[in-house]
Image: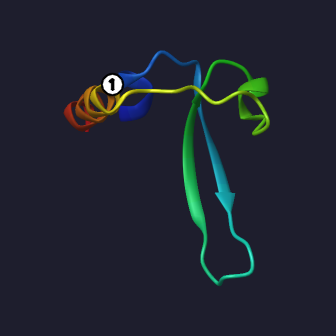
Amino acid sequence: KALKASIDCQRVAVAVLGLEVPHAHIHLVPIKTEKDMIFTNPKKQFSPEQMQAIAEKIRQAL
């Protein structure tokens, strides 16, 4: 809920990824459409300051 409240998105997708090492990474990805989950799409680039601002918005929404 905090992620959706903090970022302009329609949904929050969940991706669980694990490879040969016995652990998994759980990714919460804000998306507008299902096509946003295609990992070969160009990546959005953010400055460290932008990342800090996004992180603070999410913290405030928790």
Dividing the picture into quarters, in which one does residue 28 lie? top right
Dividing the picture into quarters, in which one does residue 33 lie? top right
How would you rate the neighbour count of disc 1 (Cα within 10 Å): few for under 14, some for 14-19, many for 20 or more?
few
Quick one: 47 or 6, which is closer to the camera? 47
Left or right position of 15 against 5: right
Quick one: 1 or 48, which is closer to the camera? 48
Quick one: 34 or 19, which is closer to the camera? 19
On-image quarter of the N terminus: top left
In percent of width and height, residue 3 lies at 41, 32
In percent of width and height, residue 13 lies at 63, 38
Q: Colour scheme used in the picture? A: rainbow
- Which residue is farthest bottom? 22
Quick one: 53 or 46, which is closer to the camera? 46
Kind of residue at badge 1: Gln
**Residue name at image x 37 percent, y 27 percent:** 47
Q: SS for tag 1?
A: helix
- The answer to whether residue 1 of the structure is visible from this angle is no
- The answer to whether residue 51 of the structure is visible from this angle is yes
Q: Mark 1 highlights which residue? A: 50
**Residue name at image x 76 percent, y 27 percent:** 34
In percent of width and height, residue 22 lies at 64, 84
Left or right position of 7 against 23: left
Dividing the picture into quarters, in which one does residue 43 lie? top right
On-image quarter of the C terminus: top left
**Residue name at image x 79 percent, y 25 percent:** 35
